[in-house]
Amino acid sequence: MPKPLVKSGAEIDGYTIGECVHAGGMATLWTVTHPGIDVPLLMKIPRVSEGEDPAAIVSFEMEMMILPRLAGPHVPACFGTGDFARQAYVVIERIPGATLYKRLPELPLPYDEARQLVARIATALADLHRQNVIHHDIKPSSIMARESGEVVLIDYGLSHHNHLPDLLQEEFRLPYGTAPYMAPERLLGVRDDARSDLFSLGVLLYFFTTGERPFGEGETLRAMRRRLWRDPHPPRKLRPDYPPWLQEVVLRCLEIEPVWRYPTASQLAFDLAHPDQVRLTARSERLKRDSLGVVWRRRFNQGAMAPRAKSDVAVQIASSPILAVALDTAEGAPELNEALRVTTERILATLPSARLACVNVLKLNRIAIDRTLDEQGSNKHIDRLVALRHWATPLKLDESRLSAHVLEAVDPAAAILEFAEANQVDHVIIGARQNSFRRTLLGSVSAKVASEATCTVTVVRPPRMAGDAGGPEAGEG
Amino acid sequence: MLLAVFSDIHGNRQAFETCLKIARAKGAKRFVLLGDFVGYGADPEWVVDTAMELVAQGAVAVRGNHDQAINSTAETMNAEAQIAIEWTRGRLDTAQRRFLAELPMQVEEDGRLFVHAEASHPQRWHYVRSTLDAAKSLIATRAHVTFCGHIHRPALYSMSVTAKMTSFVPKTDVPVQLLRGRQWLAVLGSVGQPRDGDPSAAFALFDTESCQITYCRAPYDVATAAGRIRDNGLPSWLAERLSQGC
């Protein structure tokens, strides 16, 4: 392998090398400039000389394959790569500021701050998973933020891309990664399950809210393997004021079996965005770890965890979407609400991990001051929540898959669109009001949602009755 | 330059024509034919003539076991393949048979090795079924990328400098960069008789500058190809398997 050409002032493929800003175990980072590129740039160079860890080369190869394919605000933009034939490098956008590692002295963070922070990380992860990439090294030092607030995930040396060869597949006899954050299935060699990242994020959330790492700092294989059967101390044991909903979220992320965790990062972000809607189970109440009997059964019943089918990130995400059904509980015709339920039921029937958000817009007046109480003095907001839940009862959904939201807005379509965007909704189901005077007057909410949403929208109409006008206007949403 | 690589055409004119058309439309400038031009399919003359024309224009072509069986009775095959080979022998003229007889076992150029089967002993026609087979093949060459076929199921293997292997089932239409720090074995699917459950014809494009390989699939007129097999009295299973891709 040729000697590294890198030193201050040197030029590689048009990039002028500046100063070395970081020298890590696997790579060094240099500032670089290039005529025509005006964002700050970093060049990452692997350590490949004699005696270095061969893992440095393989993980660098992985980064060279993955980084140029990533896009969007949650990853560093990649400007170029150079291969091992001459000088291996990747040039990426330099994200200003420090990683989350810098915040460790402040731990534990206030609950709400940690909730918002981890929700933003989950949103970034969801975006990464949608690009078919599992990060596999989620920890504070892999997480940065843009000035606009979006979280940026860095370091893809251990990542898995569902559409590319996995060079780390057989490279190491021992699982490679950051011990305190590593998901249990990684210790069994599983690299294609995106829920491994949710486990790591659960470790981070636990750590940031309690100040303690749930599985300690043990780096030995023996210490790491313990998490295959031993659950962590419930956070409430460490902090008696720990909110039950937060414990529910943390312990769900830290489930040993991936199938018991959140199915997707988007669904985790959803719960973090709506803590009052988190369905509390026995997890939220727990004050101590599982009994030794349970732990021993897990430990000596490993067969149950043994072979698993190959999983596919895209398939996993597609089978666990967030659906939002927009309901008009006050003015909506019963036939339309029934038709919406039939359609929703059909969609849910094929998607056992989907979650459903029932959304209603409480329309505010443009001019008059709104009262939260109606003429009879009951709270309109609560009435609507009750109505939404009542509508959803026949769907017989587990509470953890269902939530109800009343949005207060002047423009119902805009409110639904904003809700869908903020909560990473994959599919909106909305009814079209038939021939209503209001619709003629106000324009159609469903038409605006259908034309402006960035996700799939299904517009539902009640079944056509014999004798209904079949003209184009009658069916227009 | 963009290379289009085809393997295991097996006398299937409809599949080969479609692949050639798509590859040209995608900008392929040079063609590589990894052998098994004949056997199974009902249009061996057209396929061999087309291969001869392409070679005359600079294409690379290597020999497959079915091509060898045309001129040698020593090759052993299963009953259906044997029937198809005997039928094919009667269809080819002297020039076509000579073309198949004179095909090289392998061709190497610019760090790329083209061969029909596993490369350690090409004349033994071993399949590449596992990382172990792939490792044997890669150890036998210094080429950066080996292209082979024979098994009719696409796969992509790599070997690192420390001889660690990776295996991968390529995703259609997703380019993969074959990094220079390791050796690669690109196993192609079959143009004329796919066996990976997808009946569409398989081929690959390789960009020599960026070192990116893209596995492609081309839906083609299976009904006509299968009909030609039946009309010519070849075993009906050879027609049926085309629509099943197995």
Image (cartoon, coloured by chain):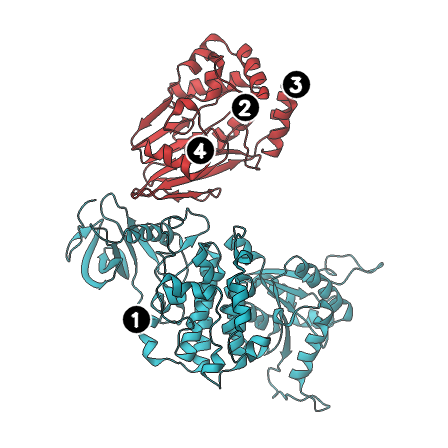
Q: CA distance from mark 1 to mark 4?
A: 50 Å
Q: Residue at x 17, y 50 (%)?
A: A5
User: Of circles 2 and 3, which is in front?
Assistant: 3
Q: CA distance from mark 3 to mark 1?
A: 72 Å
Q: CA distance from mark 1 to mark 2?
A: 61 Å
Residue A399 spot, x, y in % from top left: 64, 72
Residue B13 disc label: 2
Q: Which residue is mark 4?
A: B128
To the question of a shared chain for discs 3 and 1, the answer is no
User: What secondary structure is marked by label 4?
Assistant: loop
User: What secondary structure is marked by label 2?
Assistant: helix
Identified by mark 2, the residue type is Arg
Q: Decide which of tag 2 and tag 3 comes sooner along the chain.
A: 2
User: Residue A325 is drawn in which quadrant?
Assistant: bottom right
Letter of the chain that mark 3 sits on in the rendering: B
Identified by mark 4, the residue type is Val
User: Are the residues at dot 1 and dot 4 in contact (C-beta closer than 8 Å)?
Assistant: no
To the question of a shared chain for discs 1 and 4, the answer is no
Identified by mark 3, the residue type is Asp
Residue B169 spot, x, y in % from top left: 47, 42
To the question of a shared chain for discs 3 and 4, the answer is yes
Residue A97 disc label: 1
